[in-house]
């Protein structure tokens, strides 16, 4: 990467690109796709919302639209719980969860029966439940550990759980409970199912803006270094998380996401997507209307436009 490319972020020269994307993509947000309603509290969100932030590895952040409005991060939290778990217990996690794309919906039970309770990857719900379980064993309080990381790395002490969203998800949580019980039946959970679910729902309920989420994810662009220069992950583990985001971060649309965007990305049913340009910056886009795989329609469109207009992809 040239010095000139770096200064594109630092000198805010990307702002016109974001404004163009907001006009071309953001103005139509909500016209395609559906807001998630299987978690009732999420269905209240305005489908026309659209925000896009870019954070440079030096911490400077620029954004457009609703980039400072908090939304439910949902599965984007899985990238952070995975980072903390790998930081705490390293490679041993991989005996309990795989690294292959599933090709099935994020909440599917099907593969678990054929594959002895070992989820395909840490980003489908079954895999994320195993990660939360491991983090619970490691720390005694998995969701508080995720929250602490997000607060510290975003620099925003007001980032918090949304108890209404967590309760709403718990009330409709039969699918996740089934996944957790099924894996417990194979001996792939260390903690009681109710504890694992509570921490998983809490971490998914965390509300953050594009600004804060892009900033919090910068360790993924900095090869594992946190905002204060200390190391959260070694380069290899950071590479592994980014690789998993590329191959599994958008579930059964991960191939399409990689094809269109060309960056590691992690989506959530709140409509957020965190994407990483290693060594340069993170991107966070939010628009709540989702495609049938649970990924933000305008979010993927916006990231596609961004990498096309700037050439900033890993390929
Ligand atoms: O467990 C669930 O179903 C939600 N808390 C998270 C799912 C999710 O965000 C999938 N993302 N696209």
Image: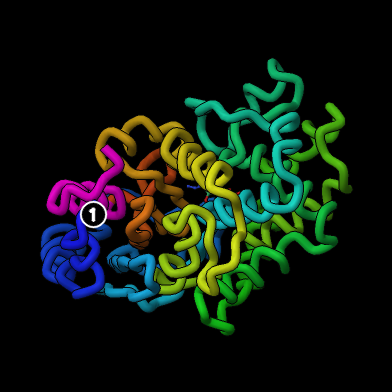
Q: Quadrant of residue 169?
A: bottom right
Quadrant of the rendering where the C terminus is positioned: top left
Q: Position of residue 16 (x, y in %)?
A: 11, 69
Q: Residue furthest front?
A: 3
Magenta stretch: give its range.
298-315
At x 51%, y 62%, the residue is: 73
> In the rendered image of this protein, does residue 227 appear above or below residue 29?
below
At x 30%, y 42%, the residue is: 314
Q: Using the rendered image of the protein, determine whether residue 27 is visible from the camera's viewpoint.
A: no
Front in this rendered view, residue 62 or 91:
91
Residue wearing tag 1 = 302
Q: Using the rendered image of the protein, determine whether residue 96 is visible from the camera's viewpoint.
A: yes
171 lies left or right of 26? right
Front in this rendered view, residue 29 or 247:
247
Q: Position of residue 215 (x, y in %)?
A: 44, 69
At x 47%, y 44%, the residue is: 242
> In the rendered image of this protein, does residue 179 appear above or below residue 113?
below
Front in this rendered view, residue 90 or 105:
90
160 lies left or right of 300? right
Q: Quadrant of residue 94?
A: top right
Q: Position of residue 2 (x, y in %)?
A: 20, 55
Label 1: element kind: helix
Q: Quadrant of residue 171?
A: bottom right
Bin the neighbour count of mark 1 within 10 Å (Cα to Cα): few under 14, some 14-19, many 20 and up: many
At x 75%, y 60%, the residue is: 142
Q: Residue furthest top?
A: 114
> In the rendered image of this protein, does residue 3 appear above or below residue 135?
below
Check if residue 311 falls in the magenta segment: yes
68 lies left or right of 223? left
């Amino acid at each position: 990467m040239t010095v000139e490319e770096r200064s594109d972020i630092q000198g805010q020269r990307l702002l016109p690109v974001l404004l163009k994307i907001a006009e071309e993509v953001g103005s139509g947000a909500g016209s395609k796709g559906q807001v998630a309603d299987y978690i009732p509290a999420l269905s209240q969100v305005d489908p026309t919302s659209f925000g896009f932030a870019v954070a440079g590895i030096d911490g400077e952040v620029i954004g457009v639209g609703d980039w400072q409005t908090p939304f439910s991060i949902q599965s984007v939290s899985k990238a952070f719980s995975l980072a903390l778990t790998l930081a705490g217990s390293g490679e041993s996690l991989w005996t309990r969860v795989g690294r292959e794309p599933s090709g099935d919906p994020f909440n599917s039970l099907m593969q678990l029966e054929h594959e002895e309770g070992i989820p395909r990857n840490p980003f489908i719900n079954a895999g994320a439940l195993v990660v939360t379980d491991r983090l619970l064993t490691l720390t005694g309080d998995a969701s508080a550990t995720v929250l602490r990381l997000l607060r510290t790395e975003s620099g925003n002490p007001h980032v918090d759980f949304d108890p209404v969203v967590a309760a709403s998800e718990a009330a409709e949580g039969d699918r996740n409970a089934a996944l957790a019980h099924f894996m417990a039946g194979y001996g792939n959970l260390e903690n009681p199912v109710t504890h694992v679910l509570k921490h998983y729902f809490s971490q998914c309920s965390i509300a953050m803006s594009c600004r804060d989420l892009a900033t919090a994810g910068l360790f993924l662009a900095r090869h594992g270094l946190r905002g204060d220069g200390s190391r959260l992950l070694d380069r290899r583990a950071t590479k592994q998380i980014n690789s998993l985001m590329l191959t599994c971060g958008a579930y059964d649309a991960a191939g399409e996401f990689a094809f269109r965007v060309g960056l590691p990305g992690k989506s959530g049913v709140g409509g957020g997507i965190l994407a990483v340009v290693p060594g340069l910056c993170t991107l966070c886009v939010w628009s709540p209307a989702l495609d049938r795989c649970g990924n933000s329609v305008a979010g993927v469109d916006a990231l596609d436009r961004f990498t096309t207009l700037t050439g900033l992809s890993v390929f």
